[in-house]
Image (cartoon, helix red, strand yellow):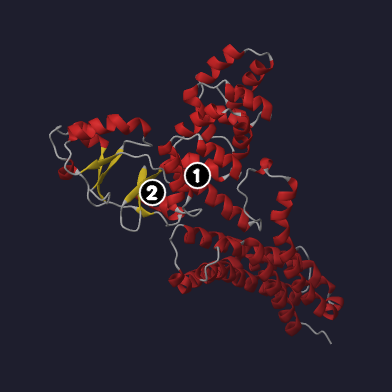
């Protein structure tokens, strides 16, 4: 059944108070679908629906709700209901949820969590935002080297239900140092008397607790893992990052880059959940900065007022030159930013990258200039000298724009800035100013302004 149909049916059952049918319906739904339906409802209706959820579904549905919806619901739950949710959440989901809560609410929730859950959550909350430690889960299956497969399977049966995944088991020594991994399929296929140390893979790839979460996502993507172990400075295992966390990271990082490339301060809330004033505050600083920087283009045009007064036709082609330069620069910057994000390009590749962009730009610029030259002469019916000025400038602007579009992101990463900040808006402003200078400089040399 489609999500829209779910919403209509749930809403109708709530309005007509057919709670028995509603319980039966949501018991057959996926937890993610229930959370999506709740996200589209009024707060009061969302709370009613949440109270109808079976206990074994409540925690999973809660984990999939937006933070605003979580905050609203938690305010109306009893201590017993709150305890049930927190104790049944995976530690990483609980930590993510608590990071968004006011301090007094966090205190109340932790007070009703069981000691083991409280310890796990506090461990995750102490790691910096965007670090691997902050997104890991501490629920995993750990084994010893001297265990037999039979003993390992017994341990999985004991702790497996509370673990995030049992597909990969982690072999630790007495100091909890990670020494190997074992796939579940080997435990199921090989003899129960086999020793874990003999069948484990000791070539383990892991991530540090303080490493950036993006690095963890890249490693999981590179090695096609479903989970990756997280270790501290002494290689002691403290948790795992699973592929579902990676999907969230990649979505979050992609959203941040897109917002930065559009000159918007990144937001951690969905568009419709962000208030008008909050949206205004995130957009206004960049708009002000770009408006002020754009005054340079105005100053350039003003300085060539006499030339424009004598050859008014030059004015008609300013928008085309500026737009083409901005578009050419954006093409290059997006390609470079993506390459930097995926570690396909490094700063040492600067000259190789610039040389490639120059050759691409020369071909693009020549094609645009020749096409435009024919258009100016055949359709616009302007003089040969003006056509030469416009098309020569167009050729140069494309080359300059693509060079700026690839150099700025690479330089910004080298000095520790986010390359996405140097994307379209900033590059467009710089290219606009350079385009006008080139345009009027060429015109000054080829036309008589006396």
Please tell me in which quadrant of the rendered image residue 73 appears. Answer: top right
Please tell me in which quadrant of the rendered image residue 300 appears. Answer: bottom right
At 14% from the left and 32% from the top, the residue drawn is 191
At 21% from the left and 43% from the top, the residue drawn is 144
Spot the residue most to the right.
309
Residue 143 is labelled as none
Numbered-mark total: 2
At 75% from the left and 65% from the top, the residue drawn is 291
Q: Secondary structure beneath disc 2? A: helix
**Callout 1: few (<14), some (14-19), or many (20+) C-alpha neighbours within 10 Å?**
few
Instruction: Report the quarter where the C terminus lies.
Output: bottom right
Q: Please state which of residues 86 and 153 is positioned toward the viewer in this rendering.
A: 86
Residue pointed to by mark 1: 248
Q: Is residue 174 left or right of residue 130?
A: left
Disc with the residue nearer the chain's start (1 vs 2): 2
In this rendering, the answer to whether 175 lies above or below 59 is below
Q: Please state which of residues 123 and 415 is positioned toward the viewer in this rendering.
A: 123
In this rendering, the answer to whether 330 lies above or below 444 is above
Q: Can the viewer see residue 304 in this picture?
A: no
Residues at discs 1 and 2 in contact (Cβ within 8 Å): no
At 52% from the left and 30% from the top, the residue drawn is 61
Q: Secondary structure beneath disc 1? A: helix
Q: Is residue 128 left or right of residue 293?
A: left
Residue pointed to by mark 2: 220
């Amino acid at each position: 059944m489609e999500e829209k149909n779910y919403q209509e049916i749930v809403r109708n059952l709530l309005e007509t108070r057919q709670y028995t049918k509603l319980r039966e319906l949501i018991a057959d739904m996926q937890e993610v679908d229930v959370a999506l339906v709740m996200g589209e409802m009024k707060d009061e209706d969302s709370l009613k629906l949440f109270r109808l959820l079976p206990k074994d579904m409540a925690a999973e549905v809660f984990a999939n709700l937006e933070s605003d919806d979580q905050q609203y619901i938690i305010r109306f739950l009893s201590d017993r209901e709150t305890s049930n949710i927190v104790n049944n959440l995976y530690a990483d989901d609980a930590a993510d949820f608590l990071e968004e809560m006011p301090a007094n609410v966090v205190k109340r929730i932790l007070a009703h969590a069981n000691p083991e859950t409280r310890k796990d959550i506090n461990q995750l909350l102490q790691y910096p935002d965007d670090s691997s430690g902050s997104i890991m889960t501490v629920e995993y299956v750990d084994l010893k080297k001297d265990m037999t497969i039979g003993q390992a399977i017994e341990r999985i049966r004991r702790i497996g239900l509370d673990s995030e995944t049992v597909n990969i088991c982690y072999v630790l020594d007495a100091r909890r140092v990670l020494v190997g991994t074992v796939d579940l399929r080997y435990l199921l296929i090989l003899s129960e008397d086999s020793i874990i140390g003999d069948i484990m893979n000791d070539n383990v790839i892991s991530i540090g607790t303080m490493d950036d979460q993006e690095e963890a996502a890249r490693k999981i993507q590179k090695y096609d893992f479903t989970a990756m172990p997280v270790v501290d400075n002494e290689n002691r295992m403290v948790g795992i990052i699973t592929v579902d966390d990676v999907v969230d990271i990649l979505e979050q990082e992609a959203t941040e880059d897109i917002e930065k490339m559009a000159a918007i301060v990144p937001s951690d809330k969905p568009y419709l959940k962000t208030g008008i004033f909050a949206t205004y505050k995130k957009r206004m600083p960049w708009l002000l900065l770009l408006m002020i920087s754009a005054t340079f283009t105005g100053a350039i045009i003003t300085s060539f007022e006499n030339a424009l007064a004598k050859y008014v036709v030059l004015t008609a082609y300013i928008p085309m030159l500026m737009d083409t330069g901005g578009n050419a620069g954006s093409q290059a910057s997006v390609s470079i930013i993506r390459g930097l994000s995926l570690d396909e390009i490094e700063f040492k590749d600067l000259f190789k990258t610039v040389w490639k962009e120059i050759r691409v730009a020369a071909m693009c610029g020549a094609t645009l200039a020749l096409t435009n030259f024919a258009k100016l002469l055949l359709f616009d019916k302007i003089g040969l000298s003006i056509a030469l000025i416009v098309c020569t400038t167009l050729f140069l602007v494309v080359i300059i724009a693509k060079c700026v579009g690839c150099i700025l992101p690479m330089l910004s990463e080298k000095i520790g800035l986010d390359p996405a900040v140097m994307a379209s808006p900033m590059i467009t402003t710089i290219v606009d100013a350079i385009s006008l200078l080139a345009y009027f400089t060429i015109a000054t040399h080829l036309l008589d302004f006396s």
